[in-house]
Amino acid sequence: MQQSISTTSLIRVLIGLFIYGGGLALMVSADIGLSPWDVLAMGISIQTTLSFGWATVFVSGLVLLLWIPLKVKLGLGSVLNAVLVGLFADLWLLFLPSYELLVSKIAVFAIGTVTIGLATGLYISAGLGKGPRDGLMVGTAEKTKKPFWMVRSFYEILVLVIGFSLGGPVGLGTIIFVVSIGYLTQLGLQLFKLADRKGIV
């Protein structure tokens, strides 16, 4: 029974990360800015030979290293998140067009943001570990005894400034993401918890 549950959880994580990569690719293709962490990844991509996806993997790897002094527990889902989200984003980007009209860019970015919120709810509900950035912020909040919102704001402002200085795109999409992602992630978690109770997934 336990093996069956583990397999189901693993499949849920993989599907969630695949969908997450698609949402991230949609935001990149919209070209109106990115989330703070993705601004950093794109900035690194611009300054190196790395693709956006591999730059995302690089950033996630660095973040996981920061878990060590914070003594955050590493889960299989954490490792899979760090490695696969960026690679899936690169894969999706191969099939996505560019957009000319601002209304199209906003619509595509919004769809990408909603997709990420729901996908986050899917892979977190599998219970195989936090995402790299979530673990860093939770671990820092616990270590410093500071409110989570304060820690999250600190990190997101820091990576946004660094990413922007490297040439990462900051714009309307950045604002859309920052304002909406908390609610969308909460909605995703609620939906998949409800689905669990009803035996849908």
Image: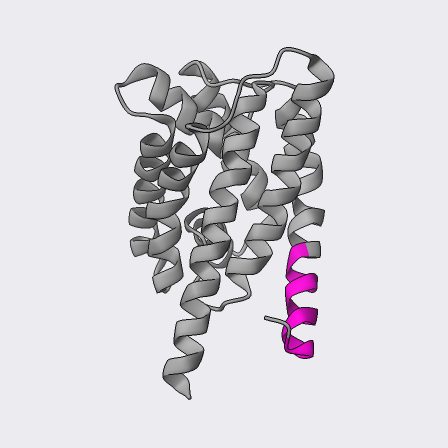
Q: Is residue 21 left or right of residue 44?
A: right
> Which residue is at 67% across, 70% downward?
195
Q: Is residue 104 left or right of residue 201?
A: right
* Span colored in magenta: 188-199
Quadrant (top left/top right/bottom left/bottom right) for the N terminus: bottom left
Where residue 146 appears, as percent x and y from the top left, is 56, 52
For the stretch drawn in magenta, what is the main secondary structure?
helix
Residue occupying the far front of the picture: 95
> Which residue is at 45% across, 53% downward?
131
Where residue 108 appears, as percent x and y from the top left, is 65, 28
Where residue 177 appears, as percent x and y from the top left, is 64, 34
> Which residue is at 45% across, 70% downward?
9
Where residue 185 appears, as percent x and y from the top left, is 64, 51
> Which residue is at 29% across, 48% downward?
65
Residue 172 can be seen in this image: yes
Q: How is the image coloured?
A: one colour
Vertical placement of residue 196 versus 39, above or below: below
| Residue 1 colored in magenta in the image | no
Residue occupying the far left of the picture: 49
Residue occupying the far bottom of the picture: 1
Q: How many labels sit on residues?
A: 0
In this orientation, which residue lies closer to the viewer: 51 or 150? 51
Vertical placement of residue 182 versus 73, above or below: above
